Amino acid sequence: MDTTKNGPGGDATTLRAAARDAARRAQATGNIEVEELCADVEELIKRIGQPADPNVAHLCARVAEAVANARQALNTRATLVQRQARDVFVAGDAYVREQPWQAIGTAAVVGVLIGLLAFRR
């Protein structure tokens, strides 16, 4: 029996693809909002142009630097989250393959608890 396709853990390939897609969607949603904000701030700085007041010019430079730092931090965090999600998935996949009956029992208990909580009046 091929446990990567059928077995206690279900279709591992489909599960892996679904987890990867969910992580991408979550990352894309957060990145889109931050990227739009960064783009708006950069557009505002461009429209200001070269201000005559040195204080305003200094402020524009600081804001531009902060936007660049925010983008870099976001990309670093996204990479870290992806790596951690992949590590968790690999560990979970390995556990299910090594302990299939315990995984089934745990899933059953969790399912019963969720069912009790969901249908509680």
Image (cartoon, helix red, strand yellow):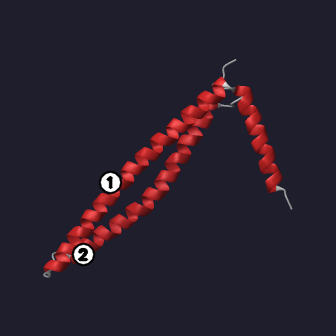
Q: Earlier in the sequence, mark 1 or mark 2?
A: 2
Question: How many numbered discs?
Answer: 2
| x 32%, y 70%: residue | 41
Using the image, tell me which numbered label, if any, was put on residue 47. 2
Q: Position of residue 31 (x, y in %)?
A: 43, 57
> What residue is shown with label 1?
72
Extreme residue toward the right, this view: 121
Q: Position of residue 16 (x, y in %)?
A: 57, 35
Name the side, left or right, on which 121 lies relative to 85. Answer: right
Q: Is residue 76 above or below residue 43?
A: above
Q: Quadrant of the N terminus?
A: top right
Question: Does any portion of residue 23 appear in the rendered image?
Answer: yes
| x 57%, y 41%: residue | 19
**79 or 11: nearer the viewer:** 79
Q: Position of residue 80 (x, y in %)?
A: 42, 45
Q: Amino acid at mark 2?
A: Arg
Name the side, left or right, on which 93 lies relative to 66. Answer: right
Report crowding for label 1: few under 14, some 14 to 19, many 20 or more residues within 10 A (C-alpha): few
The residues bearing labels 1 and 2 have C-alpha atoms spaced at a distance of 24 Å
Q: Quadrant of the C terminus?
A: bottom right
Report crowding for label 2: few under 14, some 14 to 19, many 20 or more residues within 10 A (C-alpha): few
